[in-house]
Image: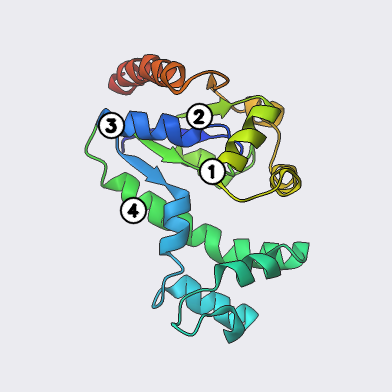
Amino acid sequence: MSYIVGLTGGIGCGKTVVSDYLGSLGVPVIDTDVIAREIVRPGQAALEALVNEFGAHILLESGELNRDKMRGIAFSSQRNKQKLDAITHPAIRRECEKQIAQIDYVYGLVVVPLLTGSSPFLKLMQRVLVVTAERKLRIKRVQTRSNLTREQVEAIMATQISDEQRLDFADDVIANNGTIEEAQRAAQRLHESYLNLAKG
């Protein structure tokens, strides 16, 4: 089993800057957001389970999941969100474990944006790297890359755990309040540390 580093952080903190950089060094990157999209493609068991649970109106005419509609239903009630998670989370984790088993490198990076202190994903990881950034900077970054209003960004942030809560289970932290180059330099230092740790 490969040495696994988990990467997490709130929206707009700059996780992608770090994961892209480590990926450019040859580190295999498994992104659970990508897996989450894969497991609900037409023909996948998780999509069938969602249709059985919520009805065929969650599909587009093409047979693909209508993500906006599904998101709206999920966030309309706690019970719906729990039903969605109960179907998708185990499927995401199974695919994640499958990809971890195929890693052919000293260590691997698993990106879990919504990682919490009680997440079963923690059992897959030997270390957790948390990327943080100041709140106003995160809001500005998200607004720059999307059409969301400040209120919409803050609403998303309100559904996520705080940096303080993430730091409770972090082994390593990159405070990404500066330039991309500074974040990459911090990632480079941790990369060297992970290579040593993984070699034991």
Mark 2 or mark 4: whose residue is earlier in sequence? 4
Indicate which disc residue 145 carries: 1
Dot 1, how many residues are within 10 Å of its Cα: few (below 14), some (14-19), or many (20+)? few
Give amino acid for label 2. Answer: Val
x and y percentages locating residue 157 in the rendered image: 70, 42
Q: CA distance from mark 2 to mark 1?
A: 26 Å
Give amino acid for label 3. Answer: Ser
x and y percentages locating residue 130 in the rendered image: 55, 28
Question: In the image shown, does 189 or 103 lie closer to the viewer?
Answer: 189
Mark 2 or mark 3: whose residue is earlier in sequence? 3
Q: Mark 3–mark 1 contact, CB under 8 Å?
A: no
Q: CA distance from mark 3 to mark 1?
A: 22 Å
Q: Nearer the viewer, mark 4 or mark 3?
A: 3
Left or right relative to 151: residue 168: left
Question: In the image shown, does 189 or 154 lie closer to the viewer?
Answer: 154
Mark 3 or mark 1: whose residue is earlier in sequence? 3
Q: Nearer the viewer, mark 2 or mark 3?
A: 3
Looking at the image, can residue 99 be seen?
yes
Identify the secondary structure beneath mark 2. Answer: strand
Indicate which disc residue 98 carries: 4
Q: Mark 4–mark 3 contact, CB under 8 Å?
A: no
Q: Is residue 177 above or below residue 85?
A: above
Q: Mark 2–mark 1 contact, CB under 8 Å?
A: no
Identify the secondary structure beneath mark 1. Answer: helix
Dot 4, how many residues are within 10 Å of its Cα: few (below 14), some (14-19), or many (20+)? few
Q: CA distance from mark 4 to mark 1?
A: 32 Å
